[in-house]
Image (cartoon, rainbow, N blue to C red):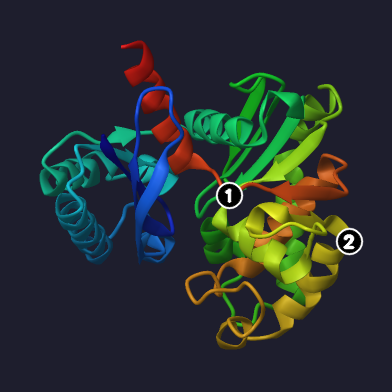
Amino acid sequence: MRLGVLDIGSNTVHLLVADARPGGRPHAQTSERTVLRLMRYLAPDGSITEEGVTALVDAVSRAREVAAKENVDELLATATSAVREATNGAEVIARIEAALGQELQVLGGESEARFTFLAVRRWFGWSAGEILLFDIGGGSLEIAAGADELPKVAASLPLGAGRTTVQFLGEDPPGEDAVEVLREHARDVLAPVAEQFLAEPRPDHVVGSSKAIRSLAKLAGYAVPGSSGIEGMLLPRAALGSWIPRLARIPASARQELPGITPDRTFQIVAGAVVLHTAMTALKVDELEVSPWALREGVLLRYIESMSWG
């Protein structure tokens, strides 16, 4: 069976097409992305502007066409924080559903964390023990922890890389004073959640799973000897912290020349780095591993599981 997962996020509209069978591992065939950075289209009242909605609907329509060309049997369409939290979210969802010709599953923050944690657990396996997960999207930061397939503790915080760029790092380059204001804000938002997670058992693996974290690992991390691909990358907190002042001093146009920083991430990579570094500090994490699987794979795996038992 050919499945498609359409992830309508704060930064991109991303279609993943994979072949799946009951009890089997999904085999990715096609990945199609449209960069939107929806946070640019937020009006002062918290609504997505007409320009933003039009761009979103166009991207969704293109993804639907790709899914049709790829002979997708079932399209699983999800939306995350930017659409969920917009004051005109109901209208935006209705227009997306009209463009798709089907219903859209709007995920709450903790649902995002649970799907992503499932994907990471399947990637690392049961023997990995206690896992602590960080996932930074455009609109939110998800943190989850536990020793099972679903997390024992999960939280979603309004500390996404796109959101915090718009709120705190509007200048290009932002400079270190603005970075410090963002760091203080992130520290305050994280404080009550950090206390909750620090009360949990010490993790055997600390994992980062988002595109922002993969980019930062390529910039500031290192590969485990003998490994290949992003799944062999480790990201030390100290190395990440040393890059933040440099990232804050150079303009976005120059950041894309750095290792791992793609053009679609160059504007918000500073905020992503600050939020991740602050979260690692708050939860007393010295280093994290990178998972190639995240939300889209979690949605796929849950659907395959329903096929297996249905």
For the residues labelled 1 and 2, the Cα–Cα distance comes to 22 Å
Instruction: State the residue at coordinates (77%, 79%).
Output: 246
Quarter holding residue 214? bottom right
- Residue 238, numbered label: 2
Quarter holding residue 165? bottom right
The percent position of residue 213, horizontal first and vertical second, equals: 64, 56
Q: Is residue 281 left or right of residue 232?
A: right
Please tell me whether mark 1 sits on a helix, a strand or a loop.
loop
How many neighbours does mark 2 have within 10 angstroms: few (below 14), some (14-19), or many (20 or more)? some
Quarter holding residue 267? bottom right
The percent position of residue 16, horizontal first and vertical second, equals: 36, 49
Contact, mark 1 vs mark 2 (Cβ under 8 Å): no
Above or below, 62 relative to 159: below
- Residue 67, numbered label: none
The answer to whether residue 43 of the structure is visible from this angle is no
> Amino acid type of disc 2?
Ala
Above or below, 303 relative to 239: above
Q: Is residue 201 left or right of residue 117?
A: right
211 and 283: which is toward the camera = 211
Above or below, 23 relative to 257: above
Please tell me whether mark 2 sits on a helix, a strand or a loop.
helix
Instruction: State the residue at coordinates (43%, 23%).
Output: 23
The percent position of residue 177, horizontal first and vertical second, equals: 76, 73
For label 1, the residue is 292
The answer to whether residue 42 of the structure is visible from this angle is yes
> Amino acid type of disc 1?
Pro
Instruction: State the residue at coordinates (59%, 79%).
Output: 171
